[in-house]
Image (spheres, rainbow, N blue to C red):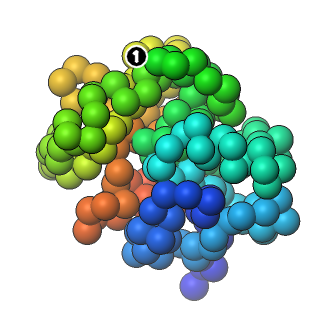
Amino acid sequence: MPVAKRVGVLALQGDFEAHKKALEQAGAHALEVRTATELDAVDALVLPGGESTTMLKLLDEEHLFGPLQRFGRERPVFGTCAGAILLATDVLKPEQRSLGLVDITVERNGYGRQLDSRVVRLPWYGNTLEAVFIRAPIIRRTGPDVNILASWRDTPVLVEQGRHLVATFHPELTDNAQVHGLFIRKLTA
């Protein structure tokens, strides 16, 4: 029986517990990551939702920005909502620094405020996928090497580039671990 892959979840802010549960449901061994040493112990990493400017501040305080950027150059990273903002090459409204690992431009809170949050059904491989949008960013541009996996209202909401995966919604807030399973499969590809 193959050994479950060790997938870290950045546990500085956001609903990292829900990501751990989804990863375990999808067959991974999920670990909380708060230090560079813990980062070195995982095969892949999930950047959860939260507030991207707060996450940047915490990454700086914990001296994790550089190690995380290096990690992403070698191993898979999956960013959801604020994590998607951190993975983007360009961030708008307002501009902010990011890890620059996925060739996309995102607009923070692009769908509106908290009151504009919603749950939608996305077309997904001949079926549907429930997507929870909470103060979600909008992907305004995708680079030539970015593959769009799902869209809502003609806007990409789930994309991949090489080993990395980005969702502008919160797949961890549903009972379905399909998106986390897709990420885990990147570890064996």
Q: Confirm whether residue 74 shows in the render.
A: no
Q: Could you tell me which secondary element the residue under label 1 belongs to?
A: strand
Please state the horizontal and vertical placement of residue 38, each as a whole percent of the image.
78, 67
Residue lying at 45% horizontally and 62% vertically, measured from the top left = 15
Residue occupying the point 43% across, 34% down: 159
| Numbered circles on residues, count | 1
Q: Which residue is mark 1?
A: 140
Give the residue type at disc 1: Arg
Which of 185/74 is in front? 74
Classify mark 1: residues with Cα within 10 Å, few (<14), some (14-19) or many (20+).
Answer: some
State whether residue 46 is above or below residue 103: below
Q: Is residue 121 left or right of residue 92?
A: left
Residue 138 showing in the rendered view: yes
Nearer the observer, 21 or 4:
21
Q: Quadrant of residue 116?
A: top left
Residue plotted at (61% across, 63% down): 11
